[in-house]
Image (cartoon, rainbow, N blue to C red):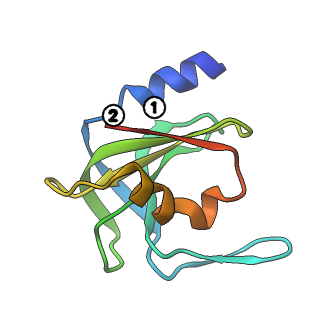
Amino acid sequence: MTFEERKEQVKSYLGKTVTIGIDRPIGYVHKKENYSLTYPINYGYIPDVLGGDGEELDVYLLGVREPVTEYECVIIAIAHRHNDVEDKLVGAPFGINFSKEEIADAIRFQEQYYDTEMEVL
C-alpha cells in the first residue's frame, strides 16, 4: 500500500460507523523488548480491513470505561503517523464527543513514540 493509498483509506472511515474487535482491552499489558505498555483504553481493529502494515486496521476506542471484546462505534479521528507505515483510527460511542486535546491525551500512552498528527471530525 502506498502512502497515498494509506491516507485515502483512513480518511474514508472518518465519520463512519464500524464494528471493531478488541484484542487489547483496558488493562492489557503488552510486553515490548525493553519495556511494557499497559493499555488505559480499549484498542482493537476493523476485522478483515488491512492497514498500512499489512495487518488489520487499528482503532483506539474512547469513552468506554470497561474492557470489551467488540464494539460498534463512530470514527471520530485519525492519528496520522509521519514516521511509521500505518495510521490509527479513533472511535467513540454514538453521541460522545472529544476535543482534539482529549483524544491526543488519551492515546499518548502509545503515540508518544511516534510523530503523530491528529485529524478530528
Is 35 situated above or below 119? below
Q: Is residue 21 left or right of residue 84?
A: left
SS for callout 2: loop
Please identify the quadrant where the N terminus is shown: top right
From the top left corner, tell me how far across and down residue 55 is, in percent. 59, 44
Q: Using residue 29 as the reference point, say whether residue 62 is left or right of it.
A: left
Count of numbered tags = 2
The type of residue carrying mark 2 is Leu
Q: Would you place residue 19 above or below residue 110 in this image?
A: above
Q: Which mark is residue 14?
A: 2
* Location of residue 102 in the rendering, given as x and y in whole percent from the top left corner: 40, 60
Which mark, by number, is residue 10? 1
Q: Return the residue nearer the eye: 14 or 105.
A: 105
- Judge left or right: residue 16 versus residue 103: left
Residue at left 31%, top 80%?
Answer: 66
| Neighbours of disc 1 within 10 Å: few (<14), some (14-19), many (20+) | many
Residue visible at 26% across and 36% down in the picture? 15
Residue 2: x and y in percent read 65, 19
Quadrant of residue 72 within the rendered picture: bottom left
Name the residue at the left extreme: 95
Instruction: Kindly indicate the quadrant of the structure image that contains residue 97.
Output: bottom left
Which of the image's four quarters has the C terminus? top left
Q: Quadrant of residue 5?
A: top right
Q: Which one is nearer the viewer's eye here, 99 or 44?
A: 99
Residue pictured at 40% horizontal, 46% vertical: 46
**Answer yes or no: do the residues labelled 2 and 1 have beta carbons within 8 Å?**
yes
